[in-house]
Image: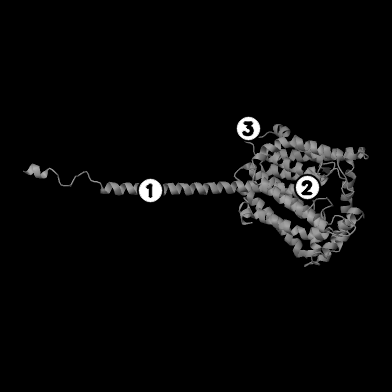
Amino acid sequence: MKQLVNSLKGDKGIWSFVALLALFSFMPVFSASSNLAYLGQGNGNTLGYLVKHLAHICIGFSIIYWVHKVPYHYFRAISKVGLPVVWILLAYTLIKGTVIAGANASRWIQVPFIGITFQTSTLASMVLFIFVARYLSKTREEPVTFKSSLWELWVPVFITLMFILPANFSTTALIFSMILMLTFIGKYPLKYIAVIIGSGIVFLAFFILVAKAFPDSRFFSRVGTWGNRIENFTTDKPDEDDYQIEKAKIAIASGKIYGLGPGKSVQKNFLPQSSSDFIYAIIVEEYGLLGGLGVLSLYLLLLFRFVIASHKANTLFGKLVVIGLGFPMIFQAMINMAVAVELLPVTGQTLPLISSGGSSIWMTCFALGIIISVTKKEEEIAQELKDAAKREEALQKLIDRELEEEVVIEGDYSIEDKATNPMHAVLNK
């Protein structure tokens, strides 16, 4: 175990907070899976879901371990090649999306021969963030113009978002917001950012108008759901989403300060997405306000480590990669918590590293592996400089010792021969 810990490179703070979130996730997932066990198996046995979650976490940490060994600058070229591949996967997802738990599932595809479902928008967001970081960190002899950046940056961005939007508005909005933040930090001209924001609003309005014109089209089926969720959020009209929010609020109110205790949640039996989208409500119900604030604090501490890692990165690409992959993870967690307390409409965003799920955990771990790879690079450079300084100091000591020995030898040597002349007796005679 000690050897394994020593082999972990990079920011130890990120490793620690990720491990704490993953370890804590077992208790709420084990408790909140009871309704799935009754619906799926009929016996209420949640042990299978716990073992499944354990397997997902173990695979996730294996992904972090192997990815963090890869130099992060390799992903610079991979993002450019991977973007067309992502477009193909997203298009296939829109056409061949599978149904999961009765939801509109044009977000998932089923991996052949394995049987697991995979949400392609998660992979697309990672590749897109790295692609944007690559563009912003390129060395240029001339200033950035809107015309050049439009074709090199924004056309690929809007193509990717266009494939994600019909099935998942919340993910599209989150990705677009993070890209705008990334371009702002990367010192992209503000006037161009304003033009892009206006273009995004116009594109969204045009998309909604087309959806209204073709309401029966499969590609626009989610537009009505978006409108209903916003309407229900601003009014008291009851529906399925309102039912989930009401149960989540009851769970949070029941938890009070100290909670009902691990495994003693009542609302997990009524909340449809208690182990994924609304797991934060179950956490507060079982562990109280203190438990909810504790989880929030872990995410904020992880955000703090991301800021430090970005500040310490020695290249602009490294800084932007940490921001582009780390910040969306934290914002997704904040959105999930905000939905549970009805600060935002229902979005379907999971709680990273805590909610049950396979591909979402693995993609989060993949992003964490790249972030830790950036911090590992800094650690290796510092270690190399330290080793070089030690070698130089040892060499200087060796030179000084040799010089001292030469001085001693020169001090003892004399050209005058004081020895007795062996021919002295003959000469004198």
Figure check: 405 above or below 193: below
Looking at the picture, tell me which residue is in the foreground, 253 or 75.
75
Mark 3 vs mark 1: which is more N-terminal?
Answer: 3
Q: Is residue 333 visible?
A: no
Q: Are circles 3 and 1 on residues that touch, CB within 8 Å?
A: no
Q: Measure the alpha-carbon separation of dots 3 and 2.
A: 41 Å
> Which secondary structure, mark 1?
helix
* Mark 1 closeness class: few <14, some 14–19, many ≥20 residues within 10 Å: few
Instruction: Name the spot of residue 255 as percent of width and height, x first.
Output: 81, 65
**Image colouring:** one colour
Q: Which mark is residue 376?
A: none
What residue would you read off at disc 1? 400
Instruction: Name the spot of residue 219 as percent of width and height, x first.
Output: 88, 39
Mark 3 vs mark 2: which is more N-terminal?
Answer: 3
Indicate left or right for 263 with 392 as reference: right
Instruction: Name the spot of residue 222 as percent of width and height, x first.
Output: 88, 44
Instruction: Name the spot of residue 23 as percent of width and height, x first.
Output: 73, 58
Q: Amino acid at mark 1?
A: Asp
Q: Measure the alpha-carbon separation of dots 1 and 2.
A: 61 Å
Mark 1 vs mark 2: which is more N-terminal?
Answer: 2
Q: Measure the alpha-carbon separation of dots 3 and 1.
A: 51 Å
Which quadrant of the rendered structure holds the C terminus? top left
* Mark 2 closeness class: few <14, some 14–19, many ≥20 residues within 10 Å: some
Q: Which mark is residue 359?
A: 2
- Foreground: disc 3 or disc 2: 2
Q: Is residue 68 visible?
A: yes
Q: Amino acid at mark 2?
A: Ser
